[in-house]
Amino acid sequence: MSPTYVGAAWAAVMVRTFVFHFGLVLLPVTAVTLWGRNWRLFLATLPLLGVTLAPTLWEFRPRPTPVVEGESVTVMSVNLLMANKSTTSIIDEIQAVDPDVLLIQEYAWHWHKALQAALSSEYPYIEYVTQEDSFGAAIYARRPFEGKVEPYIPLGSAVQPQMRAVIRIADRPVAFYNIHLLPPWGLESTIEHRAQTADLLDALAEEPLPVVLGGDFNFTENSPHASALARLGLTDAHALGGWGRGTTWPVNSFFRWIPSIRLDHVYLSNSLTCIECQTGVGYGSDHRPVMARIGFVP
């Protein structure tokens, strides 16, 4: 891929990622044109406001609660932030949610020690890879894994933990994926992010089991990456059981004052649905966790 093509693709993704923010910037412009009775300019801004803000407003509509067949389980995806040393608050949040399956990103050694001390009796089944960068990962479960957990699904050229485990819901096997894609900050990382996404799509296309796909994807619901998952029949749990924007990043540093975006997701294949989807606090991390109560479609 040429640098020009990658740069153009990156720019297109950024425009779709921050379309809501463009609408917020356009609001005072529209207000000024109305106050100044510049009717032509005012009328010209109205369609742009509709394109940029209407999709977000639509997310606040009332939604019927889906029905599940048999039991429902709670899945929690949490990016701990590897450098976050404030382990107690997030552990308290995890225990308050009481998930059946916990998908963890940025799993460093100090987090492993803290989580094992607090949760090992509640979650006897665990697969993990600790790393002192941003790409350690772990899956904690109350119920046993079926077969061997795959800690390194090959995505792109980077060797990073990308996990797959099989866990039963309503006595049916379900493939749980714990994914953390590289953020597209520059040219090389954008190429790698696209390669990881392409490999993930290939893996999911060949997956024979119902899928729960959770993690930090570093793309939003408006991205072409999310559209590609939708074409495979996967739906964001937030679209089924959530309300509002459901944003997850950023929530610390100076950037917490900027309207956040949704980079963390729980996706479900079409045989599964979500009764309720919420975001948490994630104290000390730069991401909010995502909690989804899921089950099989009747």
Image (cartoon, grey):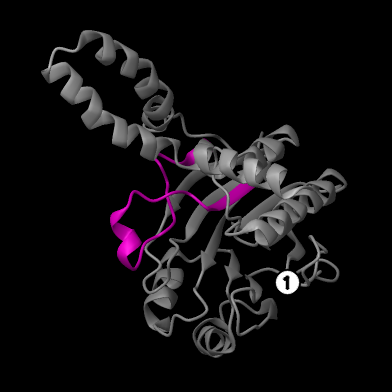
Q: Relative to 186, is 82 on the left or the right? A: left
- For the question of whether residue 181 can be seen, the reply is no
* Count of marks, rendered view: 1
Is 298 placed above or below 158 here? Answer: above
Is 215 placed above or below 136 here? Answer: above
Frontmost residue, 252 versus 209: 252
- For the question of whether residue 120 can be seen, the reply is yes
Mark 1, residues whose alpha carbon is within 10 Å: few (<14), some, or many (≥20)? many
Q: Position of residue 160 (x, y in %)?
A: 73, 72
Is 122 placed above or below 271 here? Answer: below
Quadrant of the drawing holding the C terminus: top right
Residue at left offset 52%, top offset 51% = 292
Start-end of magenta stretch: 240-267
Residue at left offset 48%, top offset 81% = 83
Q: Relative to 224, is 293 on the left or the right? A: left
Frontmost residue, 7 versus 135: 7
Q: Please identify the dominant SS of the magenta region.
A: loop
Check the image and name the residue furthest to the left. 35
**Quadrant in which residue 113 is drawn:** bottom right
Q: Position of residue 218 (x, y in %)?
A: 57, 55
Residue at left offset 68%, top offset 51% = 212
**Quadrant in which residue 40 is drawn:** top left
Residue matched to label 1: 161
| Magenta segment includes 260 | yes
Disc 1, SS: loop
Frontmost residue, 241 versus 132: 132
Amino acid on which the number 1 mark rests in the picture = Pro
Is 134 placed above or below 53 here? Answer: below
Q: Position of residue 196 (x, y in %)?
A: 75, 56
Residue at left offset 43%, top offset 23% = 51
| Magenta segment includes 84 | no
